[in-house]
Image (cartoon, rainbow, N blue to C red):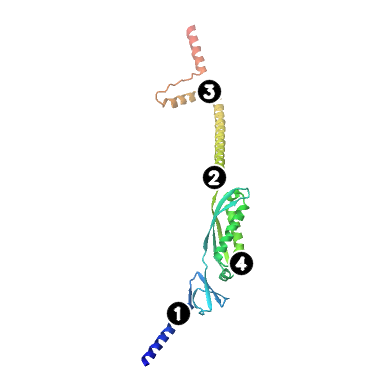
């Protein structure tokens, strides 16, 4: 009988020890440096604790961990209509973090999903108030508007939105072709303007050169010789050399004097 009683007592003590260890394990909580533990006691908010190690009251306290690090939230591609009635697909990314763990748990059911939904609707609204040219050329302004709107709406949830960036704007094929034609026409216009400006500068320079040459006939002869030098560089070339009228007159006069003698 004594042995059986001792064995029963040992089992009872062992069971109590196991229960005590399990209760102690459930009471011990460790919160990382980048986390906070929001504690509820019998359904009532106690507060946020951490980082470090602390104890909970078993079966009475409940803890919810909240990550305080910056979260990169992808906003999926949205089909939006701009103010000038152009349908575009836009996606973005939102960077936010929790600054009030208690509000993030108590004031909203799921702060990540709620922020994601607000970001989607805000993206469509802001794109609808912007023109296509503004969306393509003033993206920083639209990013600031999105950041301000989302941050204002998520502030009661203890959320701070740091940055919102539009990643990609997808245009319809017809709009892409129209923009390509417009860009090509703009390039052709610039090329023609540059060519016309070059022609005008060349004509002005030639006019100045002609004016200088006309004032000095010997300069024309030098120009003839220079042209011959440039042409003679090529092989198998037929050179037509224009003889100045003055030279022909001098030769004719010389011939007349010879015949009179």
Question: Which residue is tagged 4?
Answer: 156
Q: Earlier in the sequence, mark 2 or mark 1?
A: 1
- Comparing 244 with 52, the one in front is 52
Among the two numbered marks 1 and 3 on one chain, the one whose residue lies closer to the N terminus = 1
The answer, for residue 161, to whether it is visible in the render is: no
Q: Earlier in the sequence, mark 4 or mark 2?
A: 4
Q: Residue furthest front?
A: 1
Tell me the element at label 1. Answer: helix
Mark 1 near mark 3, Cβ–Cβ under 8 Å?
A: no
Q: In the image, which is nearer the foreground, mark 4 or mark 2? A: 2
The residue furthest top is: 260
Residue 64: give x, y in percent of width and height: 52, 72
> Is residue 124 something that shows in the picture?
yes
Which numbered mark, 1 or 3, is in the foreground of this view? Answer: 1
Label 2 to label 1, Cα distance in Å?
A: 64 Å
Binning the other alpha carbons within 10 Å of mark 2 as few (below 14), some (14 to 19) or many (20 upward) gives few
Q: CA distance from mark 3 to mark 2?
A: 65 Å
Label 1, label 4: how far apart the Cα atoms are: 38 Å
Residue at 56% across, 61% down: 116
Percent coordinates x, y for residue 103 in the rendering: 58, 70
Picture layout, residue 93 above or below residue 218: below
Find disc 2 in the rendering and name its residue.
173
Please report whichever mark, 3 or 2, sits nearer to the chain's N-terminal start: 2
The N terminus sits in image quarter: bottom left
Q: From the viewer's perspective, is the residue at label 4 or at label 3 nearer? A: 4
Residue named by callout 3: 217
Residue found at x 60% / y 65%:
155
N-term-proximal mark, 1 vs 4: 1
Vertical arrangement, residue 229 with respect to residue 169, above or below: above
Q: Secondary structure at mark 4?
A: helix
Q: CA distance from mark 4 to mark 3?
A: 92 Å
The numbered disc on residue 22 is 1
């Amino acid at each position: 009988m004594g042995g059986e009683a001792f064995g029963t007592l040992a089992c009872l003590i062992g069971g109590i020890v196991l229960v005590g260890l399990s209760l102690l394990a459930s009471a011990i909580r460790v919160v990382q440096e980048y986390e906070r533990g929001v504690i509820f006691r019998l359904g009532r908010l106690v507060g946020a604790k951490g980082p470090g190690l602390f104890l909970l009251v078993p079966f009475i306290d409940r803890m919810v961990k909240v990550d305080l690090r910056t979260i990169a939230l992808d906003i999926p591609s949205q089909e939006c209509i701009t103010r000038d009635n152009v349908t575009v697909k836009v996606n973005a990314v939102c960077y936010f973090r929790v600054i009030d763990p208690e509000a993030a748990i108590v004031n909203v059911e799921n702060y990540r999903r709620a922020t994601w939904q607000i970001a989607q609707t805000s993206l469509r609204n802001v794109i609808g108030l912007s023109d296509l040219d503004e969306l393509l050329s003033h993206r920083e302004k639209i990013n600031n508007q999105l950041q301000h709107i989302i941050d204002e709406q998520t502030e009661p949830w203890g959320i701070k939105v740091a940055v919102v960036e539009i990643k990609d704007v997808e245009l319809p094929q017809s709009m892409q072709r129209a923009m390509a034609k417009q860009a090509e026409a703009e390039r052709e216009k610039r090329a023609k303007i540059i060519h016309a400006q070059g022609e005008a500068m060349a004509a002005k320079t030639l006019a100045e050169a002609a004016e200088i040459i006309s004032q000095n006939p010997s300069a024309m002869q030098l120009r003839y010789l220079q042209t011959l030098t440039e042409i003679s560089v090529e092989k198998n070339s037929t050179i037509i050399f224009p003889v100045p009228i003055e030279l022909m007159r001098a030769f004719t006069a010389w011939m007349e004097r010879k015949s009179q003698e």
